[in-house]
Image (tube, coloured by chain):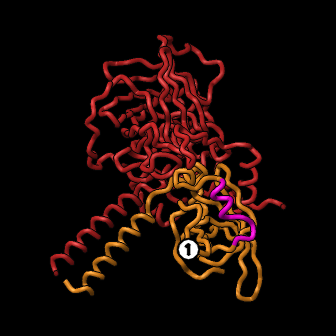
Amino acid sequence: MSSVVKNRMLFIIAATVGIVVLALPIFAHHGTNISYDRSQAWTAKAVVTEFRYVNPHPQLYFDVTDAKGTVTHWGAELLPNPAQLIKNGWSKKRSTDALMPGTVITVTVAPSKAGGTVGLLLKAVDDKGEELVPGGGGGAPTPGP
Amino acid sequence: MRNRFVIAIALMAVLIFSLVVIAQNRGGQGAQNNAAAPARDTRPFNAKNLAGIWSRNSNGYGGGGTCRDCGDRGFGNNVPPFTPLGQKMFDANKPSYGRALGSDDAKAHPEEHIGRRRAVPPANGTDLYQSCNPQGVPRALIYPDPVEFIVLPDRIIQNFEWTYSWRTIWTDGRQLPKEVDLARWWGYSVGRWDGETFVVDSIGHDDRTWVDHFGYPHSDQMHLQERYRRVSYDTLELNMWIEDPKVYVGRWNADVKRFKLLPKDAIKTPEGWTGILEDLCAPVEDVEQFNKNIRDPAGGVFHNK
């Protein structure tokens, strides 16, 4: 088997497994999925202003600066609640340490269907490329606002 | 080489099929009762010992979806006709689970009962659970987070991880009350063994709880019967029905539910503390803060800062 074909096979398998993993069902404690539009998900650099590790859903508040320098303040809820974060290895200390105010991260957010500056946090990645407080189901890396 | 490529494509097809099955389960749609039974733990077990932490969650605890073989997420698809009062109660309930009300997705599934095709954002809903009130039963039994059965000589306590709520099932031989003065969030429950089936009858349920997260109502006249049967070391099957003449015409039989037994150390904090979590939705200030800043704006309901 040529290396080209082999690589193609590996890519297909890896991509498929990735899709399935990302699609693992999440049962939001508060039916939260219904409020957000995953098809409009965007990705952008953000500066953390506050992180709350609480029930019913943890929340991340952050600022996003667009190309014109306009700063927009966003609030996003996490799909996993503290119990699920614990299961994923993200204790309160680890989570809050990783999301201290002023931390620069890359967020992927599904915005509210109702508009405004609230959304569902699909993914948060630090400057080293590590995914933080995972469990949101990932997200498409499309340009942000 | 071609064969290997075909195998890769076949593998992809299998995985995509799995994806479709998983997706069908998202949001609670799609009965899973026809899924092939998984390999069962063949270790010996005592069919009359229900003690342990059981979960319908594919991930074990803390959110996540219902496992493929654990049964439908709702109470059941064969919803009996509503009485006029039942229809009125059903129409008044606005759940946030299921397919979005009026969506193409909802229109594409006319085979599903309307109860599963009318979800609205929590900000626009009427689910008391959204404010972290008790779920009651049978709803809590359908929830994917774990429940611990604590077996005592005169009762079995079900400790539900989400909201850390206790429900007592008395096994001391008492009868259900003839009349209930004050309905309870978790009802009044008695249990007995019928062969190797543990049968629980309960009445006196507060009518503010829902049968399941799709917003099916019940009245304070609901009689719930649960029939638990441990069919293998790690599998517990639950069959249920409700009778509620004020709301439904005839008995509503649930689709069978299955729980998996979690090893004692399956639930573990990062520092190694095992056992069911205190997944309590408190204090109320945190709930109100979340609702005001995130949940409500996401549903188009804005509060003054």
Q: Which residue lies furthest to the front in this view?
A: B271
Quadrant where the image shows the N terminus of chain B = bottom left
Foreground: A68 or B118? A68
Chain ID for label 1?
Answer: A
Chain in red in the render: B
Foreground: A105 or B136? A105
Above or below for B120 versus A37: above
Q: Position of residue B121 (x, y in %)?
A: 62, 57
Q: In this view, does B123 lie to the left or right of B198?
A: right
Q: Does the magenta stretch include residue A99?
A: yes
Bounds of the magenta segment: A93-103
Determine the image quadrant of residue A131. Answer: bottom right
Residue drawn where x is 63% and y is 57% of the image: A94
Determine the image quadrant of residue B124. Answer: bottom right
Residue drawn where x is 41% and y is 17% of the image: B192
Q: Position of residue B245 (x, y in %)?
A: 50, 28
Q: Is residue B224 left or right of residue A129?
A: left
Please state which amino acid type lies under the numbered disc 1.
Gly
Neighbourhood count class around disc 1 (C-alpha, 10 Å): few under 14, some 14–19, many 20 upward: few
Tally the numbered discs.
Answer: 1
Identify residue for label 1: A129
Quadrant where the image shows the C terminus of chain B = bottom right
Chain in orange in the render: A
